[in-house]
Amino acid sequence: MTEDQPIACPGCQAMVSGRFCEHCGTALGNQACPQCGAEVEPGTRFCTNCGAATDRTQAGKGTPRAVPINRWWLLAGATVVVVVALMIVTRSQPPVPSTGPVGGALGTPPDISQMSPRERFDELYNRIMTAAQIGDQNTVVQFTPMALAAYGQLDNVDPDARYHVSMILLHQGGIAEAQAHADTILAGQPGHLFGYVIEAAVARWSGDSTRLAQIYSDFRSHYPEEIASGKPEYQEHGSMLDDVKATAEAAARAGS
């Protein structure tokens, strides 16, 4: 296929050409990672298998922590359990309007052609979380690759983006990958509440009640100072943090 030859987009069936569908953002072809040889979608700045820069001009500008994806689809059958475990951290997300019942209750691809990479990532994240809340696994599976591709195109990965991608990864069984994002957040900003929120979700998924109790304790001890800092991401996810705080306090009372 040449970039000028129109084809039917695999995501929305529109006739398009180029590297990405201008209507829904679906990649129209793959390229090989120069480091490990894995296929990566065109326009992705970093390989989602090994973390290497896919564009050699990006070398030396900082490579995000590797987020291997080899095991995701092997663990997709466990997603129902993850949905239950993550309800507490998805409550704060606004619903994304559905434009049609294609591929699931929220299956119609959103028009992301005019969005920045961060806007695309946030839009797709909201759509995935909304679908997870109502048990629409088809939409979760459909939009996860698009969301991860948008994440790979980000120039700046802040704690908010790491929190979002961790929730997506957990829906695919990416426990170790989500923990790596929590480690990165807490290493860069010790005490950041999102690091503990991700760790708590990982501990719940793993069934590690001892570790979960310690995480809740750390969350509670850092909560006053962190909230007082007025970080924008805390204001955006205020309901979620309130829920985690209430759960952490209930756990402390039950353990006393």
Image (tube, rainbow, N blue to C red):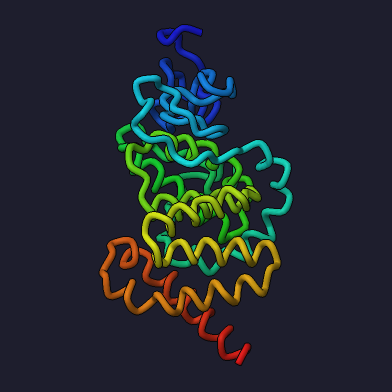
The answer to whether residue 8 shows anywhere in this view is no
Which quadrant is home to the C terminus?
A: bottom right
- The percent position of residue 111, horizontal first and vertical second, equals 38, 37
At 49% across and 65% down in the image, what residue appears?
A: 197
**In terms of depth relative to the viewer, which is nearer, 70 or 90?**
70
How many numbered tags mark residues here? 0
Percent x, y of residue 74: 73, 42
Q: Is residue 92 above or below residue 70?
A: below
The reply, left or right, for residue 225 in relation to residue 134 is left
Residue 89, position as x, y percentages in the image: 50, 65
Residue lying at 36% horizontally and 59% vertically, measured from the top left: 189
Residue 220 falls in which quadrant of the image? bottom left
134 left or right of 127? right
Q: Nearer the viewer, residue 66 or 3?
A: 66
Instruction: Residue at 57%, 33% (x, y): give it.
Output: 49
Residue 32 percent across, percent down from the top left: 54, 18
Question: Which residue sits at x=37%, y=35%?
Answer: 62
Q: Is residue 177 visible?
A: yes
Q: Is residue 163 above or below residue 123?
A: below
* Rendered view: 24 above or below 227: above
